[in-house]
Amino acid sequence: MMNALAANERWTGSRRLLGPLESMQRDAIVQSLLDYHGSKVKTAESLGMSRATVYRKIRQYGIITPAS
């Protein structure tokens, strides 16, 4: 069984070194995307962000989603 960290690493292709807060945000987004099977709408709702913010952070953090 793959651990959660390894699963999260598969979903990211970060192009730069992230600070601690950015890393925590990225991990929360990735985990929520995994929990909601890639649904950005449900991810946004669960994290209290707008859908536009989720899309922006996906691009900013280099998160790779199946639909990308």
Image (cartoon, grey):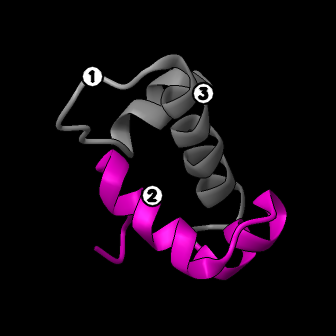
User: Residue at 62% of width from left, 67% of height from top?
Assistant: 37
User: Residue at 82% of width from left, 63% of height from top?
Assistant: 46
Q: Residue furthest left?
A: 15
Q: Are marks 1 and 2 in contact (CB under 8 Å)?
A: no
User: Residue at 35% of width from left, 46% of height from top?
Assistant: 61
In this rendering, is residue 31 above or below 20?
below
Tell whether position 51 is magenta: yes
Q: Which residue is mark 3?
A: 4
Q: Are marks 3 and 2 in contact (CB under 8 Å)?
A: no
- Indicate which disc, 1 or 3, sits on the residue closer to the N terminus: 3
Q: Main secondary structure of the magenta part?
A: helix
The label on residue 43 is none
Query: Quick one: 7 or 50, which is closer to the camera?
Result: 50
User: Residue at 59% of width from left, 39% of height from top?
Assistant: 25
Q: Select label 3 or label 2 by which is in front.
A: 2
Q: Are marks 1 and 3 in contact (CB under 8 Å)?
A: no
Residues in magenta, as a range:
39-68
Q: Amino acid at mark 3?
A: Ala
